[in-house]
Image (cartoon, grey):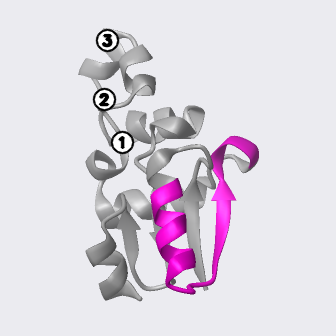
């Protein structure tokens, strides 16, 4: 079963969900805002993709962090930042048990599914 992690009002999430629905792909949705971020999953994602891929440095949540935090970020602090501020995780995160995708590109979804 495919599981998508993200925030429902995110435009990229909306595009990814529409693509899955248009292609009749069943999936479960995990809402960061409502259900938080599963710490074990986040650590697994970091090991698989790297914290640099998961940490969204282009969004408003990143810009709200103080300069000291931004300039000293490393794997350990990035995990803490993502746990404390789920909105800073690049979206969507999609897993199917074997593969992990971060972000939405329909070409990647086509290959995965």
Q: Position of residue 110 (x, y in %)?
A: 34, 84
Q: Which residue is the extreme one toward the right?
A: 34
Q: Position of residue 61 (x, y in %)?
A: 45, 25
Image height check: is 66 above or below 15? above
The residue positioned 36% from the left and 62% from the top of the image is 104
Mark nearer the N terminus (1 vs 2): 1
- Magenta-drawn stretch contains 110: no
Q: Is residue 45 left or right of residue 107?
A: right
Mark nearer the N terminus (3 vs 2): 3
The residue positioned 52% from the left and 67% from the top of the image is 18
The answer to the question of whether label 1 and label 2 lie on touching residues, with beta carbons closer than 8 A, is yes
Query: Which residue is disc 3 drawn over?
Result: 68
Image disc number at residue 5? none
Given residues 21 and 35, the one toward you in this image is: 21
Image disc number at residue 73? 2
The answer to the question of whether label 3 and label 1 lie on touching residues, with beta carbons closer than 8 A, is no
| Residue range highlighted in magenta | 14-34
Labels 1, 2: front one? 1
Query: Which residue is disc 1 drawn over?
Result: 55
The residue positioned 36% from the left and 18% from the top of the image is 63
């Amino acid at each position: 079963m495919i599981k998508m992690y993200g925030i429902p009002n995110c435009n990229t999430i909306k595009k990814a969900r529409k693509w899955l629905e248009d292609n009749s792909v069943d999936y479960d949705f995990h809402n960061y805002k409502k259900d938080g971020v599963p710490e074990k999953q986040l650590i697994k994602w970091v090991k698989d993709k790297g914290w640099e891929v998961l940490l969204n440095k282009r969004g408003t949540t990143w810009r709200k962090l103080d300069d000291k935090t931004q300039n000293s970020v490393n794997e350990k602090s990035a995990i803490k930042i993502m746990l404390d501020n789920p909105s800073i995780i690049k979206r969507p995160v999609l897993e199917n048990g074997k593969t992990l995708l971060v972000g939405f590109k329909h070409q990647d979804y086509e290959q995965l599914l």
